[in-house]
Image: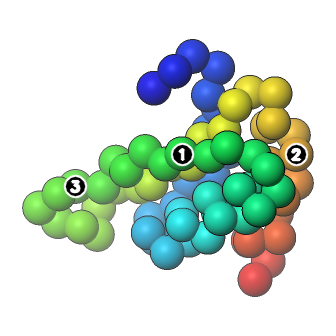
Amino acid sequence: MEVNWTKVYTTSSPVKAEMAKGLLRENQIEAVELNKRDSCYGNFGSIEVYCHAENVINALEILKKLDHE
């Protein structure tokens, strides 16, 4: 991963991770995910969503909506 990416969201749900990325992209914030789930036992681990450091404050504000849904 490039330098200056910051984690803005963590979940165990692949669906929630995709929703988070989608919300950020709708707001013109580039986002990527890092899947740390165990490949043998899919229920263990997490998926982290990252964005560029300069977008962190906006991203966190946007993702507050996701947690309230």
Residue type at tag 3: Asp
Where on the picture, by quarter, is residue 23? Answer: bottom right
**Which mark identifies residue 53?**
none
Which class describes the residues within 10 Å of circle 2: few (<14), some (14-19), or many (20+)? few
- Rounded to the nearest angstrom, the CA distance separating label 3 from label 2 is 30 Å
**Which mark identifies residue 38?**
3
Q: Is residue 63 visible?
A: no
What residue does disc 1 label? Answer: 32
Picture coordinates of residue 2 (x, y %)? 52, 21
What residue does disc 2 label? Answer: 58
Which class describes the residues within 10 Å of circle 3: few (<14), some (14-19), or many (20+)? few
Residue lying at 81% horizontally and 27% vertically, measured from the top left: 54
Q: Nearer the viewer, mark 3 or mark 2?
A: 2
- Rounded to the nearest angstrom, the CA distance separating label 2 from label 1 is 16 Å
Q: The residue tagged with tag 1: helix, strand or loop?
A: strand
In the figure, 52 relative to 40: above or below?
above
- Rounded to the nearest angstrom, the CA distance separating label 1 from label 3 is 19 Å
Residue type at tag 1: Val
Residue lying at 62% horizontally and 46% vertically, measured from the top left: 31
Residue lying at 65% horizontally and 65% vertically, measured from the top left: 22
Q: The residue tagged with tag 2: helix, strand or loop?
A: helix
